[in-house]
Amino acid sequence: MPLYTSQHLKIYNSLSGEKENFTPIHDGNVGMYVCGPTVYSNVHLGNVRTFMSFDVIFRYFLHLDYKVRYVRNITDVGHIVDDVDEGEDKIAKKARLEQLEPMEVVQRYTVDFHDILKSFNFLPPSIEPTATGHIIEQIEIIKKIIDSGIGYIANGSVYFDVVKYNETNNYGVLSGRNIEDMLANTRDLDGQSDKRNPQDFALWKKAEPEHIMRWPSPWSDGFPGWHLECTAMSTKYLGNHFDIHGGGMDLKFPHHECEIAQNEACTGQSPVNYWMHANMLTLNGKKMAKSTGNNILPGEILSGNNNILSKAFSASVTRFFMLQAHYRSILDFSDDAIVAAEKGYKRLMEAVEALPSINPSKTSSLDISSWKQLCYDAMNDDFNTPILIAQLFEAVRYINLLKEGKETLTAEDLNSFTTAINAFVFDVLGLSDEKASDANNDKLEGVVNMLIGMRNQARADKNFALSDQIRDQLIGLGIQLKDGKEGTSFSL
């Protein structure tokens, strides 16, 4: 039987403001969409925390034996500076400042994003669509919203009429905002805008002559609105009604509010059962943000190249630090906090490494079944990683007592205990045992250097067939050799 049949997961739903029992639309299957990065600059550590929260959620669904389709997009057009409708596209602005093609900017920072997530041991999503790859789908949605009477055309641009939408729906259902208050607190543009109402948002923007990123549409050569992109990509791969939509807390309004409105105007139904929002990582008590410069880059953590850091910290230590806080809680970064996390991480890993040395006994004095269920209870309570980590440190205490001979476990219980610890530490939390990784790397380096020595001897003996065979087989394993004046080196 799948594990999810015996576990009862509760998820905090931002839409209701309550923890709710998780019931997927299709039994045994989970559809989850998470708003990905706008690739105009390097992601900072706060971004990493958001994506890490959903990486753990993805991992836990997989651990429970669900079949998961996890879609996380790349925004490569349409995200205007300051998250408004008027102004310059963030990627186009970066391209202009650096004298690059917009897609050069996109490629550079998409590769950087993937490299960073890989270094922090993220699982890749099932699908990673780009906004520019779904222009046709976005145009079709706009047509439907216009046909519903809620979208309107103005000078080649298309806008969403929130006042008209609110006559039969609730614009503000997710964020708890009242449209009358929003309109009252918004400055009137006095005819400077094509919008009917200040709160209306762009579905399609007519491109100015100098705007590089543009596509033909029935209304103008232009580009899609930022909010529309996620509606198009989520519904294309997950359907008009799916299980989970996630993102950072700062996306709740206006981005996710607008997504709900677009879906309801287009399909007549609410798109998502569970809205999930990860809270921010702060630095000096203030939100990390690329725009303000109050941030730490992942590379700075790994290198120690930042004035607030006493030294470099590994990706696994950083991951452990972040998971000590619940994903809905604000987490403040400091050198003292991550130093303390490093000590805890090392203590946990030392205990895990000691497990194989423990010998089984004829009887068990520890209730492993109850401990294991407490670990599940933590994750079933809205993915409560700090409580899970507390239970793992209870396991550390067990391991120390077992090593000292003060407690005992049968072979069956010891195997169950070991399997559970490894599952929660490595599969669910996504931590890595860096000592084991370093040891494996040392062994790999030793084997490759031995083969390089054999190849050098073959070349000296003019046995070029053997020399080429060694080189080609290493290439087949993803190991590249480079011959130079100082000898032969290799890279993975």
Image (tube, grey):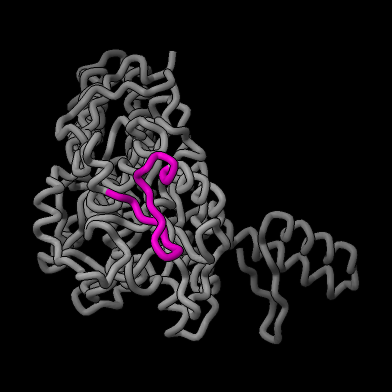
Q: Quadrant of the N terminus?
A: top left
Query: Image point 21% across, 73% down: which residue?
Result: 294
| Residue 152 covered by magenta stretch | yes
Residue range corresponding to the magenta coloring: 145-161
Query: Image point 29% across, 63% down: which residue?
Result: 45
- Asked whether the viewer can see residue 286, the reply is yes
Front-lying residue, 303 or 277: 277
- Asked whether the viewer can see residue 357, the reply is no
**Number of disc labels:** 0
Relative to 234, say whether 51 is above or below: below
Horizontally, is 442 left or right of 462 in the view? Answer: left
Residue 92, by quadrant, is bottom left
Query: Image point 27% across, 13% down: which residue?
Result: 363
Q: Position of residue 70 (x, y in %)?
A: 45, 40
Relative to 333, say whether 324 is above or below: above
Q: Position of residue 427 (x, y in %)?
A: 39, 38
Horizontally, is 132 left or right of 119 in the view? Answer: right
Residue 54, by quadrant, is top left
Front-lying residue, 266 or 340: 266
Q: Quadrant of the C terminus?
A: bottom right
Front-lying residue, 111 or 343: 111
Query: Image point 41% across, 78% down: which residue?
Result: 93
| Residue 486 covered by magenta stretch | no
Front-lying residue, 74 or 147: 147
Q: Position of residue 259 (x, y in %)?
A: 34, 45
Q: Position of residue 330 (x, y in %)?
A: 15, 53
